[in-house]
């Protein structure tokens, strides 16, 4: 079986980080009215550049039948605080328009990676079935 990292490229790692980022952005949106809440985000480009190092990929699995994820994927990426464009009197740094825009962009990019992975999977299954 071919190496899944070579088959899917960066998209398998991107899906995990985009999912994590969606959760962080959703938490920001949910706390738009919480006093002193500080908006956070994941610097996607920075995290991905740290994780895409072929020499650091180590595959581990609890069962030989499981498909393993590269061990360098971390879902506990360092969160950074977002600096607001306009200060709030209650100390909240969430700007709903910014967060909604970031959330929408992240969702579109997640869908693009998912579409790519689905296409590769379909191609692999088609090749295996002999069609």
Image (cartoon, helix red, strand yellow):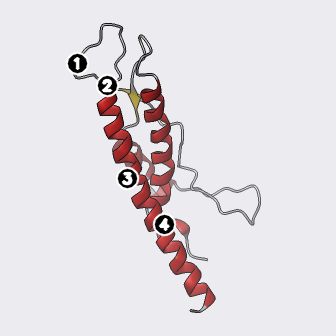
Looking at the image, do the residues carrying marks 1 and 2 touch, with CB atoms under 8 Å apart? yes
> Disc 3 versus disc 2: distance between alpha carbons?
20 Å
Question: Which residue matches tag 4?
Answer: 117
Whether residue 130 is visible: yes
Say what secondary structure mark 1 lies in.
loop
Q: Give me the disc on residue 86.
A: 1
Tell me the quarter of the picture where residue 80 sits: top left
Say what secondary structure mark 4 lies in.
helix
Crowding at mark 4 (Cα within 10 Å: few <14, some 14-19, many 20+): some
> Disc 1 versus disc 3: distance between alpha carbons?
27 Å
* Sequence-earlier tag: 2 or 4: 2
* Sequence-earlier tag: 4 or 1: 1
Looking at the image, do the residues carrying marks 3 and 2 touch, with CB atoms under 8 Å apart? no
Q: Give me the disc on residue 95.
A: 2
Q: Nearer the viewer, residue 80 or 84?
A: 84
Q: Nearer the viewer, residue 37 or 7?
A: 37
Question: Which residue matches tag 3?
Answer: 108
Depth check, mark 4 against mark 1: the one in front is 1
């Amino acid at each position: 079986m071919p190496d899944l990292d070579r088959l899917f490229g960066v998209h398998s790692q991107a899906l995990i980080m985009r999912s994590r980022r969606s959760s962080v952005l959703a938490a920001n949106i949910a706390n738009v009215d919480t006093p002193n809440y500080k908006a956070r985000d994941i610097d996607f480009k920075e995290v991905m550049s740290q994780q895409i190092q072929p020499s650091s990929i180590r595959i581990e699995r609890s069962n030989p039948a499981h498909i393993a994820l590269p061990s360098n994927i971390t879902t506990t990426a360092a969160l950074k605080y977002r600096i607001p464009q306009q200060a709030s009197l209650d100390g909240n740094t969430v700007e709903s328009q910014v967060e909604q825009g970031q959330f929408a962009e992240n969702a579109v990019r997640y869908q693009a990676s998912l579409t790519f992975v689905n296409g590769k999977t379909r191609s692999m299954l088609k090749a295996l079935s002999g069609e």
